Amino acid sequence: MASTYSFDVTTGCDLQEVDNAVNQAQKEVVQRFDFKGSHILIDFKRAENVIKLEAEGDMRSEALLDVLRSKLIKRGVSVKNLDVTDLVPGSGEIQRREIKLKMALDSETAKKVSAAIKEAKLKKITASIQGEQVRVSSPDKDALQECITMLRKGDYGVELQFGNFR
């Protein structure tokens, strides 16, 4: 009896680490000289997977985004999973920006991953898109390890996570 082994390719962010990074960024912004006396807002809407940023002027808005990115990197959250929108002018010199967290593979990314696996022509590997993840299966565990290595080398616009290795 030949058994098949499989793993799932997904993406996502640890929301607790994102929350910690947002709190650290808020503490740093309060202490920094270049933000003193100006309107700064960092708001994490956990239920919506959105971080809202507000700052006075383009320079402070970009600096605020850099502070947040650095804190996310230190907490182990991939910045590839951030979908940063353009600056939207608010009242006065206030600039607003939303950052959406990518918590699942969209259909385009799932198709890219599946196509990359098929183009690699690894022996006896099949990839199937199952909603927000890609299931990769094979009767050979070593082939699956080669597939994971190949996928880690590629750039798909998000950080890939590999789980449910059976």
Image (spheres, rainbow, N blue to C red):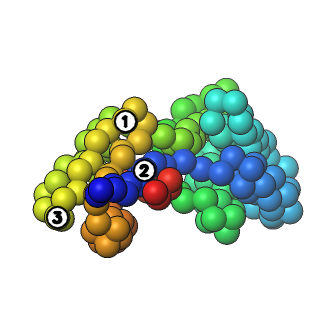
Element under disc 1 = strand
* Amino acid on which the number 3 mark rests in the picture: Lys
Mark 1 or 3, nearer chain start: 3
Rendered-image quadrant of the N terminus = bottom left
Q: Quadrant of residue 35?
A: bottom right
Q: Nearer the viewer, residue 66 or 101?
A: 101
- Pair 1/3: label in front: 3
Q: Which residue is mark 3?
A: 123
Q: Nearer the viewer, residue 98 or 142?
A: 142
Q: Is residue 26 visible?
A: no
Q: Which residue is mark 1?
A: 130
Q: Position of residue 95 (x, y in %)?
A: 62, 38
Element under disc 2 = strand
Quote the CA–CA distance across marks 3 and 2: 18 Å
Residue placed at 50% from the left, 55% from the top?
A: 163
Q: Which residue is mark 2?
A: 8
Does the CB distance between marks 2 and 1 fall below 8 Å? yes
